Amino acid sequence: MNYDFLGPVLPVIIAFVIAVILSPVIIPLLKRLKCGQTEREELVSHQVKSGTPTMGGLVILMAVSITSLIYIREYPRLIPVLFMTVGFGLIGFLDDYLKVVLQRSDGLLPWQKLLLQFVITGIFAVYLIKVEEVPMTMTVPFTHGYQWDPGLLSLPILFFAVPGTVNGVNFTDGLDGLASGVTVLVATFFTVVALGTDSGIAPVTCSVVGALMGFLLYNVYPAKVFMGDTGSLALGGFVVSTAYMLQMPLFILLVGFVYLLEVLSVMIQVGYFKLTHGKRVFRMAPIHHHFELGGLSGRGEGWSETRVVAVFSVVTALLCCIGLAAL
């Protein structure tokens, strides 16, 4: 793979420009279709966001897809990553469309969503093993490149890691610029690794970085558009498929710690609520809302939305630096 000086930068620029051009077109369209966000009643400070267009993940999907297709002939190894990104994005789009446009409050039923996720994951697994012949061994952080072979547990771990990561990113998408800000850092981490290992998937990781930078111009506080499940599920599919193509799924626990924290907070909250018949561990889950409502002490007014996003992003940036050292 010959990447000249402009090589890593060009897909970032292309995706960024596409996202910046598409956003002013798609946002008014979403407004006309009345694809507005509905906020939880407990979050009083969020009520002003009700009606803000959602499904903005279409911008990310289109920017990444168009940019990746430019490079796909020369870099065919990006196909499984693009497939997972678009595949999960389409699941999210269907869920958003049912909830927002058709006003079906539940969207896709949980079993429908899980079934579709397993179908996409199954196709990815077959392509990964049979076509790309990527070993299912995993690089263990801080071991100087030691490869762990899970053996017969490889596929069960894959089918656990995919929905786990996707739902982690989905739960992270609750504040202006949070999911996009955290994921642009994770995508940058994987881009550095992809370029350093000459893996052949750098154009798609670069395009995600560029698309998210362009989207963030409209998604930072106060957001003009939200990504919805269309964007968050697509980004989850991207993160986990990239990690598997680089044989680094264990690194998701490190660089994607925010995703892990978000999904664990929901599991703990729901489990404890059921066990204690109504008691809660957190003021609200996912955990970013807990910090908004007073944090661990419960005193004062809690953190501002922008502070939560800044802290979670800084933590992710530090963990990505540690992740590079862990290689």
Image (tube, rainbow, N blue to C red):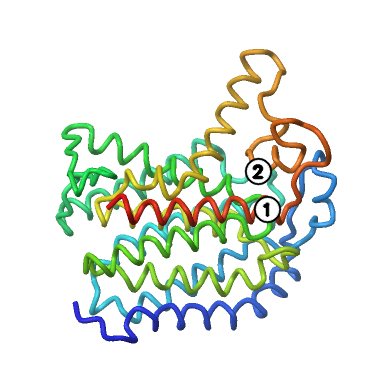
Judged from the image, the secondary structure of the residue bearing numbered disc 1 is loop
Between 327 and 211, the one lying in front of the other is: 327
Q: Which mark is residue 33?
A: none
Distance from disc 1 to disc 2, alpha carbons, whole Å, reads 8 Å
Name of the residue lying farthest toward the top: 276
- Compared to residue 89, the image places residue 212 above or below, namely below
- Compared to residue 233, the image places residue 143 above or below, namely above
Mark found first going from the N terminus, 1 or 2: 1
- Compared to residue 242, the image places residue 265 above or below, namely above
> How busy is the neighbourhood of tag 2: few (under 14 within 10 Å), some, or many (20 plus)?
many
Q: Which mark is residue 288?
A: 2
Mark 1: amino acid: Leu
Q: Measuring from the top left, give residue 172's x and y in whole percent.
A: 58, 48
> How busy is the neighbourhood of tag 1: few (under 14 within 10 Å), some, or many (20 plus)?
many
Say which quadrant the N terminus sits in. Answer: bottom left
Mark 2: amino acid: His
Between 225 and 86, the one lying in front of the other is: 225
Q: Left or right: 241 with respect to 272? A: left
Residue depicted at 42% across the width and 55% down the height: 320
